[in-house]
Structures are given as structure tokens and as C-alpha cells.
Image (tube, rainbow, N blue to C red):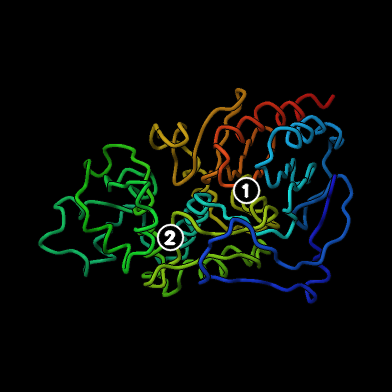
Amino acid sequence: MKLVRICIGMLILVLLVTGCTKSAVENNKEVPVVIESLQPSTPLSEETESSKETIPPSKFDQLHTYIQDKEQQIRSVIVSRDEDIIFEEYYGDATESTLNHVRSVTKSVLSALIGIAIEEGFIKDIDQKVEEFFPEYMTKETHPQVDEITIKHLLTMTSGIPYNYMNYSSWISADNPIETTLALDLITDPGADFYYNDPGVHILSGIISKTTGMKASDFAEKYLFDELGIHSYEWPTDLQGNNFGPAELELTARDMLKFGQLYLNKGKWNGKTVVPAGWVDESVTAHTDGGLPSGGKYGYLWWVTQVNDYTSYYAMGYGGQFIYIIPELDLVTVITSGLDRHYEGNKMLVEQFVIPAIINTK
């Protein structure tokens, strides 16, 4: 098993890559980092002590063998419990420095940024209407109910904005995706029904730009990424300079794990509040019954479900990119995959291998 650690004491030797305007075409990119060997139990943050109950790496032998034999699309798996990394493995040509296109996991990161922006006073609250931020896009032709859409509707996928997944490439390359989105006719009343779509989430990125004077990536660096020690990432923008809200962010698996651990810790990192605890709680509480593509209930750009009788929540991206959190077990699991991987396959790995390895320790 390959266990690796970012060497904090040698940061001056690390090449930090923060490409925020480059188009994310490839699924994985290599970022030079300094690494050293890890012991079987590796603390994630400075304050963390070793796990009270040591879980031997051999507990994950079945998972490792299954992936090697049957899951060639898997790129990386990291499991942490009580903030200790207890399993970390990379497959194919992926390494600890690989940048993974996390797809819709981007949405959950954007949700955190909205919560921070509210806490910092840039945004009043989630009941603010979209028209307050983009009056220039409201015309005589605008659908009459567009002016009823609120930030909460965008966070819960209940805005009524239509979306065809097959048109993603044309939407993402539009001259002004936000203006294009707000010109659409709604398919339901705002707040009425869950309808998963990307364009509505992108509006949230534009709201961050409008209210803070910073694009989402710059805002994230100041208030989120720097706090977690996330320095290597890519997050391209549309032609208006707004980072793509629904997808396109690229992170290492380790940095995905940090973000998941932050939420398990109710928004705290090394004893400091990074995301308000109240926002974390609201984000991972089901506000709608959800639906496709995951089938789970939905919070504020987080999926909420039961797995093996445990309440859990997760960030999920196309192709099986996952940050899976089970508070009762103090468990965070990160899985990245090739883009042909199906969602349900990686959820199965958590259900059939990770959880049993934890609860059957004795």
C-alpha cells in the first residue's frame, strides 16, 4: 500500500500550481509536490492525535484486491477516521499529486463559499432574489417568475430553471452563460420541485463575483483554500470571468479529503471556524426529496442519504467522484474515477467494503 504525506515543513520546495483560467479538458494532471513516507495512521490536521482505535491496513485488503481485479476506472481511494488517514491508495497512473476533475463536487465547494459570503456580510441571506444581483438581465421578455428565484432555490435545485445535460458543452461555451440562463422560460414555479441542473448553480458563482468583487476562486483562496492548505488546483472561468459553478474544479484526492473533514468537523479546521457550523448543518440537512441523478435527498448542493443504516451525506461528481461522510463513524471516504465510471459503483465500495472494515475492527 502506498501511504504518502505532503511535507508541510518543506513548503518552500513545493511548486504550487493554481491555474484558475485554464480549460479543464483532461481528467487528471500532475502537480509537483514534496512527499515523505507515512505511518499507517496519519493525522490530517495539526491538532489531531492518533486514532484511539487503531485500524490495521489489512482491513482494507478486500477493497484493494477488488479494485485491482474489477474496477480499472478507479483512480484513488482515501479513507480517514477520527481525522487519521487509515487507507490511501492510487491506481493506474494516478498519484497523490494528480489533479482530478471533480465534476459536480464543485457544487458542494461553491455551497461552502456562499455560506462564508453570508457570514462575512457580502450576501444578506439565502432569501435574496437573483434579480437583485443581475437587474441588467431582466427584460420585457424575461419569464415573469424568474424574479421570484432566490439563492435558496438555486442551492436546493428548486429554481424551475430547465436544463438538458446534452447541451452542457454549448452552455459552458456561451458568451454569457448567466444571461443565457436567466432568459429561459421556467418549467416549474420556483420552490415547487427538485430539478437537478447546472446553469442555476453557475448563477451562484456570478453572485459571489458580484458581491465580493472577487471571482469564486480568489474568494475561495482567501477564505477556504488557504485555511485548508489547498494550493494546487484548477478552476476555469466562463467568458465573463466567472468560475464555473456546477463543475470544472480540479483538486487532488488529499485536498478533497480535507474539504470532507472540514464538514465532518462542523466547519472547523485546526480549531478555527472556516465555514459557519450552522451553515454546515443546514447544507447537509435534506430540504427536498431530491431525485436524479443520485436518487438521494438534497440539501444545499449536498446529497443526503442513509447508507448501511447510517445517516450520511456526500458530494458527488459525474463519473464517480465522491466525498462520502458518515458522522456516526467519524468517517470520510474520497474516491476518484475515470469519467466512464457509474455513480452507483463507487457508492457500493463504501457500503460493501469501507463501512464493514470500520465496524468489524474487533
Three-letter amino acid code of the residue under disc 2: Ile
Residue highlighted by disc 2: 118
User: Is residue 181 placed above or below 166 in the rendered structure?
Assistant: below
- Residue that numbered label 1 is attached to: 260
The mark that comes first in sequence, 2 or 1, is 2
Q: How many marks?
A: 2
Q: Quadrant of the N terminus?
A: top right
x, y percent for residue 235: 53, 65
The reply, left or right, for residue 329 in relation to residue 128 is: right
For the point 35% across and 54% down, which residue is it? 199
Nearer to me, 72 or 291 = 72
Which amino acid type is shown beneath numbered disc 1? Answer: Gly
251 with respect to 91 (left or right)? left
**Numbered disc 2: secondary structure:** helix
Identity of the residue drawn at 47% across and 60% down: 119
Picture residue at 25% right of the left edge, 58% below the top: 182
- SS state under label 1: helix
Distance of label 2 from label 1 (alpha carbons) = 21 Å
287 shown above or below 201? above
Q: Is residue 115 above or below residue 243?
A: above
Q: In front: mark 2 or mark 1?
A: 1
